Amino acid sequence: MRIDIITVLPELLESPLNHSIMKRAKERGLLDIHLHQLREFAVNKHGQVDDTQYGGGAGMVIMCEPLSDCIEKLKAERAYDDIIYLTPDGKTFHQKMANTLSLKENVMMICGHYKGIDQRIRDLYVTMEISIGDYVLSGGELAAAILVDSIGRLIPGVLNDETSALTDSHQDGLLAPPVYTRPAEFKGLKVPEVLLNGHFKMIEEWRQEEALKRTAERRPDLME
Ligand code: ADE
């Protein structure tokens, strides 16, 4: 899978996408991430990519021309399955969207800043608008990093234990059950007996019950 990210702050994305599982995904040739500095498409030699908004009001808006030039350049090189704009007024991101996106071949992501991007870019090019939650970030970069991480780990071959992503919270619509490792007793707290007896079917039943209990307690909205 190839992901192209358009941003005025590529430095913000470099570290999160170059460690741990994302690093491994890149090294294995399963995830190919390209960061594009929007200022390379600036409207003047001062690197300008934004301007005040029509109608007045505080905050700058990212201009059409730099974004359009960058998007058109990328589109001329390959076909994109989706062009995603990260924005707090987008559709709230969830695990099903991560699953769907992990099956795509080429995805472009646009990070906004300040007041956002000119509406005409959204009308002309953007196929999906995604928010990572009901709060406002200073830019789309951290949201893009979250999308790439959650999508990247679902690509077959990225995680070492292939079944691991399937048992994550949200993967089956429920929160994940509690997990334990050695020692069997810590500060008086014991690992549930069922996990020690090695009976596969009973362990599965216990995990399912605990997942349901945890979901009902913490996220009753998911039970519906
Ligand atoms: N940009 C600013 N806030 C955001 C959010 N909540 N989700 C995605 N992109 C954003």
Image (cartoon, rainbow, N blue to C red):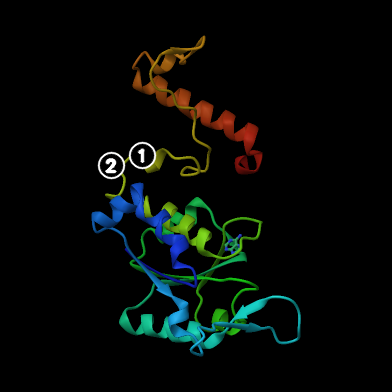
The mark closer to the camera, 2 or 1, is 2
Determine the residue positioned at 41% across, 22% down: 203
- Choose between 220 and 126: the one closer to the eye: 126
Q: Residue furthest left?
A: 28
User: Considering the numbered disc 2 on the image, is that residue within a helix, a strand or a loop?
Assistant: loop
The picture places residue 210, in percent across and down from the top left corner, at: 52, 27
In front of the other: 97 or 73: 73
Amino acid at the residue labelled 2: Asn
Q: Which residue is mark 1?
A: 164
Q: Please, which residue is most extreme toward the right here?
A: 56
Residue 122 figure quarter: bottom right
Q: Which residue is mark 2?
A: 160
* 223 displayed left or right of 10: right
Q: Amino acid at mark 1?
A: Ser
Do the residues bearing badges 2 and 1 touch, measured as CB atoms within 8 Å?
yes
Identify the secondary structure beneath mark 1: helix
Q: Quadrant of residue 137?
A: bottom right
Q: Which residue is drawn at the image coordinates 57% and 57% (left, top)?
A: 132
The image's mark for residue 124 is: none
The location of residue 3, given as percent across then percent down, is 37, 66
Q: Residue furthest front?
A: 46
Residue at image point 58% right, 31% down = 214
